[in-house]
Image (tube, helix red, strand yellow):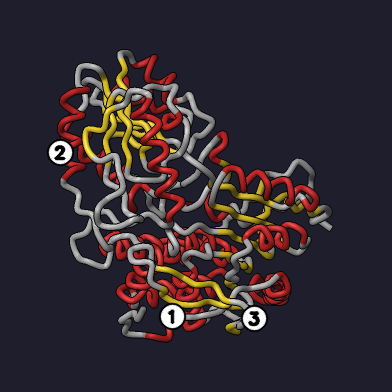
Amino acid sequence: MSLQLKRQDLLKNGSYVGARWLTSESDISVLNPASGDEVARVADAAAHDVSSAIDCAATAFPSWAAKTAKERGQILRKWFDLVIAHKEDLARIMVAEQGKPMAEARAEIDYGASFIEWYSEEAKRAYGDVYPTTVEGGRMEAVKQPVGVCGAITPWNFPVAMITRKAAPALAAGCTMIVKPSELTPLSALALAELAEEAGVPQGVLNIVVSSDSAMVGQVFCNDARVRKLSFTGSTRVGKILMEQSAQDLKRLSMELGGNAPFIVFEDADIDAAVAGAVASKFRNAGQTCVCANRFYIHKTLYDEFAAKFSDAVSALRVGNGAEEGVEIGPLIEAKAIDKVHGLVSEAVEAGAYALCGGAVHDYGAQYYQPTVLTDVTQDMRIAREEIFGPVAPLFKFSTEDDVVAMANQTEYGLASYFYARDVGRVHRVAQALHSGIVCVNAGGFSTEVAPFGGVKHSGFGREASRYGLDEYLDLKYVFVADLNR
């Protein structure tokens, strides 16, 4: 498959380690989920390549950390400018390997670049504190210093933003980083590395290792004491494994794991706004996001009206190849994702749920699933407990505020929650009562570089974005100096 890019050199075919592009004896075939065509072949990194990347990052760390925050910020700003300048090429690469619609890909490039811009500015704001001394002639202060070499493992659903949201604060703080992108979507990561080098990111400061053996890469990261911080976005199951493996060295960890977000529509909600928000939240990236609404709780007095309006809006979504302008729902990432989604839908229907629209594989192709709305869903169905990761919206009915909050919190996950209501007292009560790291009121989206992103419970810990995201890559050191009066 040939990609029409203004800069063909952004399409790389090997890991980026110490400012070198690696080759290997075996390759990974990167497939377009929309067509099954091969987009590129990328060298499959081995364990020694990952170790080499750690060597390079460790060597580069002292000089990168020694740069002033302003110098690091200026380099990051150049990286941001280059990403924006090449947005169209980066979006084309993303659509080809990930499948999302072109409009969403362009939006993700903007979103991903925003983290680079934000941390280019925040680099200068890693403030410490000076405390009133408790000892005559003494000085007490707290300073922030970079953690050191960091590892990052990122998923396929946002192949640019999930990297920049980790790498930008790490580099701003003075850390060096090795990123392991998903083997399903490595091309976006490698293109980012090319632009980072052009921006002046020094050799070894940012490394990208592409491997089909994610477990091996995680093991190498966890077993190497030089890697002082690991940031992971992915499943809760894998996150727990990485935590166990990191325990020996007591590494700093950030875990952005699974989600099972509730979307609540109270009786005083603006129903049309709620429908629009529900479509935006659920069907972005064909439902393949960790924060998308997974369970829709609709007050019994609005249930039928909401279901009808929502189903009409969902039925109107245009399904197709993401490279075509106007497409709103692209393919799922791979065949087993279709199997999982259809299995959840089929089980629910067999147990008494009803598909108002959708409910089957789409005629467009084997990796496309019909945008689906299910009614008469109950809490005991598997679809109420598991993360769907597809374009399927199950609707539940509720009667009281207390009941729906209890149902919403009846999950091991706690990443995002959504609800629509106009009563100001209810807005504050429910926002406080929901067990999640993010609560979105009267809107279907919330992500921004200026606000913290992260979850609680089995959705993980640590925060990305905002000023708190920088702290994830900084150690706090207390310094006491005595006898200053001598």
Query: In the rendering, at what x and y percent does residue 200 appear?
Result: 52, 82
Going by the numbered disc 2, the residue's amino acid type is Asp
Q: Residues within 10 Å of mark 3 (few under 14, many from 20)?
A: few
Q: For mark 3, what is the residue? A: 25
Q: Nearer the viewer, residue 459 or 385?
A: 385
Q: For mark 1, what is the residue? A: 11
* SS at badge 3: loop
Specify which label sits upstream in the sequence, 3 or 1.
1
Q: For mark 2, what is the residue? A: 312
Specify which label sits upstream in the sequence, 1 or 2.
1
Going by the numbered disc 3, the residue's amino acid type is Glu
Q: Nearer the viewer, residue 15 or 394?
A: 394
Figure check: 21 above or below 184? below
Query: On the rendered structure, is 134 left or right of 262?
Result: right
Q: CA distance from mark 1 to mark 2?
A: 40 Å
Who's the residue at 35% across and 55% down the image?
367
Figure check: 140 above or below 187? above
Who's the residue at 31% across and 84% down the image?
6
